[in-house]
Image (spheres, rainbow, N blue to C red):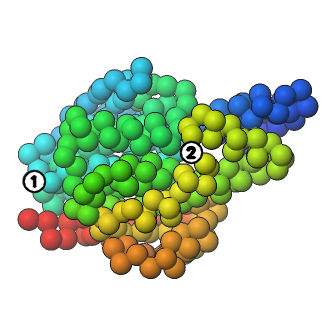
Amino acid sequence: MKLLENLFIFFYRTRLRLLAIVSMKKAAALAFRLFITPISVKSKKQSTLPPGAEPLSFNFENNSIKGYRWNPTGNKKVLLLHGFSSTLTKFMHYVQPLVDNGFEVLAFDAPAHGMSTGKTVNVLQYRDMIEQVVKLYGPVDAFIAHSFGGLALSLYTEKLANNAALKIVLIAPATETTTAISYFSEKLGISKKLQAAMHIHIFERSGIKVADFSVRRAMKQIQSTTLWIHDIDDDVTPWKDAEAVQKDGHPNVRFVNTTGLGHRRIYRDETVAKTVVDFIAKNNP
């Protein structure tokens, strides 16, 4: 796997450098496409799912979105949101404890992930997919989101007129897209000039500056009761970005810091999972 990753990086690093000589604009478009293309992760077989899984599917922007529902008679609903190059199956250890606390649980693979179709996904598409899930299967009372899912969730939540009634869990959210692009660019050896061209490309596509794809910015519009769990040693969504939000002093946000779990082990950790479920279930009628 490491050899294939290194070959992929070498191929596209060379291609981007050559393309940038011919056309910086075309190189930026290719770099952005790579940025929004997840590494393929297939969901595990249905037999590995917690009992009572009801398959669900719907169409979204010409893609088939696949997911599951548990305990449809639950008194409140929770939506699980995975990160980039991940899948809903990574979060199955949250399902039974939530069901045991009386919740209906929903989980879907984002476009281009797991069982869902598609080749690419950007954060606005993920945001809009969340909105469609809520329209089809909601109302949703609480959300648990990791990494890229946390950014998408924050962009969805800030649009809601009455988001104070929601409970939100952000686990190692992709706090700043500027940081994500820098991390991606470092891996592919993308120059500062091409990074700047990527920023321009994203603005031309969306009408939004890269700096505004930000959990920190969105949190200024979010009054939801929020649990934010982040590892000090996270090398993908660095703690320094989350720390800036903590210093903003939002009274509705509770921070829990861990050490040594990094970006992916954090959501699998038993103590973290218990903290999340306890937070969601607290004061649940």
Bin the neighbour count of mark 2 within 10 Å (Cα to Cα): few under 14, some 14-19, many 20 and up: few
Judging depth in this view, the residue of 173 and 245 nearest the camera is 245
Mark yes or no: residue 263 visible.
yes
Could you tell me which residue is drawn at 29 percent across and 27 percent down? Answer: 57
Q: Secondary structure at mark 1?
A: loop
Judging depth in this view, the residue of 161 and 20 nearest the camera is 161
In the figure, is residue 161 to the left or right of 251? left
To which quarter of the image does residue 279 belong? bottom left
The mark closer to the camera, 1 or 2, is: 2
Q: Position of residue 50 (x, y in %)?
A: 26, 45
Q: Position of residue 239 (x, y in %)?
A: 58, 70
Could you tell me which residue is drawn at 24 percent across and 57 percent down? Answer: 162
Kindly identify which numbered label has been placed on residue 208.
Answer: 2
Mark yes or no: residue 34 visible.
no
Could you tell me which residue is drawn at 50 percent across and 61 percent down? Answer: 217
Q: Position of residue 280 (x, y in %)?
A: 25, 64
Q: Position of residue 264 (x, y in %)?
A: 52, 57
**Label 1 vs 2, first from the N-terminus:** 1
Which amino acid, mark 1?
Answer: Asn
Which amino acid, mark 2?
Answer: Ile
To which quarter of the image does residue 201 belong? top right
In the figure, is residue 48 to the left or right of 234? left
Q: CA distance from mark 1 to mark 2?
A: 38 Å
Q: Secondary structure at mark 2?
A: loop
Could you tell me which residue is drawn at 36 percent across and 50 percent down? Answer: 159
Kindly identify which numbered label has been placed on residue 75.
Answer: 1
To which quarter of the image does residue 21 belong? top right
